[in-house]
Image: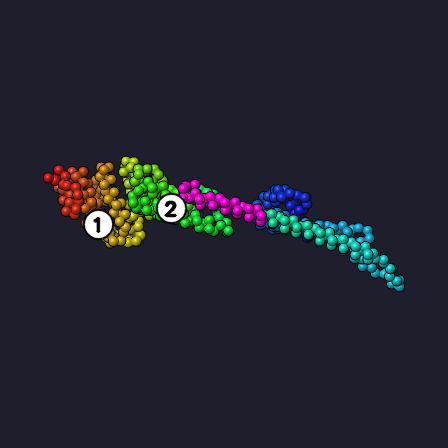
Amino acid sequence: MKNHYQTLGVPTAASEEQVKAAFKSLAVQLHPDKHQGNLEMEERFKEINEAYQVLSDPYQKAQFDLKLHYQNFSTSQAQRPGYSSPAPAYKHPPGRHRPFVQYDYKGNVKSTLFAFGITFLIALVAMGVSGLHTLYLQNKYEELLVERRGVFDKAQELYSSNIKESLTILADLAPFKTEEEDMKSFRSEKLEEIIFKGETYYLEKDFEQAIAYYELVDRFSPYRPPTMKARLAQSYRFIHKPNQSLRLFAELIEDNYQVIATLVQMGEVYRDELEDFESARDYLELARDAAIRQYRSRFGRAYSVVVTSEFIPVDHFYLFEDLGKLYNEMDEPEKSLGASHWMKRVWPDSASAYAIAGKSHELMGNTTLACGEYQLAIFLGHSDPLPIICK
């Protein structure tokens, strides 16, 4: 039988920490990655791993100690005077009688019984210690469950008066144990209830209240629906907190959630809230490039001929409308004409497309073309009157 203590180079009375330290030291020296192809080192590594698995487990260690003790005891008995051991083969010379050998049968029986008695006693002690340890751990676990149940009851009581404190307690309890499925269900139900309240306030345009509930979900829920995060970002935008809004929009982009629409919203925040037109243009152009890649992927290189409004989301209309207006505001009418041309191609009934084109021609000094575009915009329902240059 292998002596695991010798394998790790520790005494039989070694503590758990000594066994662990010895294993770590040997594992670093003998790890196969350091001795690729060396079968001897691989075998040594397996031996120290096996030794550590046995000596680090209290139950396996007790069994091993019992076997080792019995082996050592048997060896020591075999070396004592009077202990009967197998007699060596003896061949008597021809013509002579075999010598008579006197065996100590009684001594042999006593030694054997004594060895088995010691072994049985050690086994009983080991089993008793293991059983007591298991019982101790079971009692401690049951005490923990009772303590956690008391904390959960407090969280339930607090929920009606202090939702945030209640959710904080529930978050500290997670992850829940097998016996605590009701706790897990309670937390899930309350978080779903909070999401529903946030959605209700958002639809009622009470953005302050919507944020209060959305933030609870964002902080305490293990699952944060991207639609909720998008609405939280919009809510920040509507109460004029652009930095919080942009942070959440950036997270949505990283999650690949409605990339084009999210980039447009970021551009609008930079334009309307921060008046950073250059950053707004950068994000809107990123959205435009993503939209064009989408068209080419779906319709091929001839996308400009076959794309119509029924095939693309309405968000794309706002993308090109924002770009056209922003280019005019930044005195880049040629680029604005490109955006308005695409709008007229895909959304021919859009009054906004002709108004943007009219402004672009006006900035370029083409009064006749500008007035023609403005008149078409008014014909299609644009609310702004004709500018002075057309009267």
Q: Position of residue 19 (x, y in %)?
A: 63, 44
Q: Nearer the viewer, mark 1 or mark 2?
A: 2
Q: Residue at x 28, y 54 (%)?
A: 299
- Coloring scheme used: rainbow
Residue that badge 2 annotates: 194
| Front position in the image: 92 or 112 | 112
Residue 275 as seen in the image, left or right of residue 138: left
Q: Which residues are magenta?
A: 138-165
Q: Residue at x 35, y 46 (%)?
A: 197
Amino acid at pointer 2:
Ile
Residue 170 as seen in the image, left or right of residue 106: left
Q: Residue at x 82, y 51 (%)?
A: 81
For residue 106, above or below residue 275: below
> Which residue ends up furthest to the left in the rendered image?
391
Is the residue under label 2 in contact with that under label 1 (CB below 8 Å)? Answer: no
> Which residue ends up furthest to the top in the rendered image?
275
Amino acid at pointer 1:
Trp
Query: In the rendered view of the protein, which quadrant contains the C terminus?
Result: top left
In the image, residue 149 lies in the stretch drawn in magenta: yes
Q: Position of residue 334 (x, y in %)?
A: 21, 41
| Front position in the image: 242 or 45 | 242
- Helix, strand, or loop for circle 2? helix
Mark 1 surroundings: few (<14), some (14-19) or many (≥20) residues within 10 A: some
Residue that badge 1 annotates: 347
> Which circle's residue, 1 or 2, is located before the other in the chain?
2
| Front position in the image: 376 or 272 | 272
Tell me where residue 25 sits by quadrant.
Answer: top right
Give the dominant element type of the magenta stretch: helix, strand or loop. helix
Residue 319 as seen in the image, left or right of residue 362: right
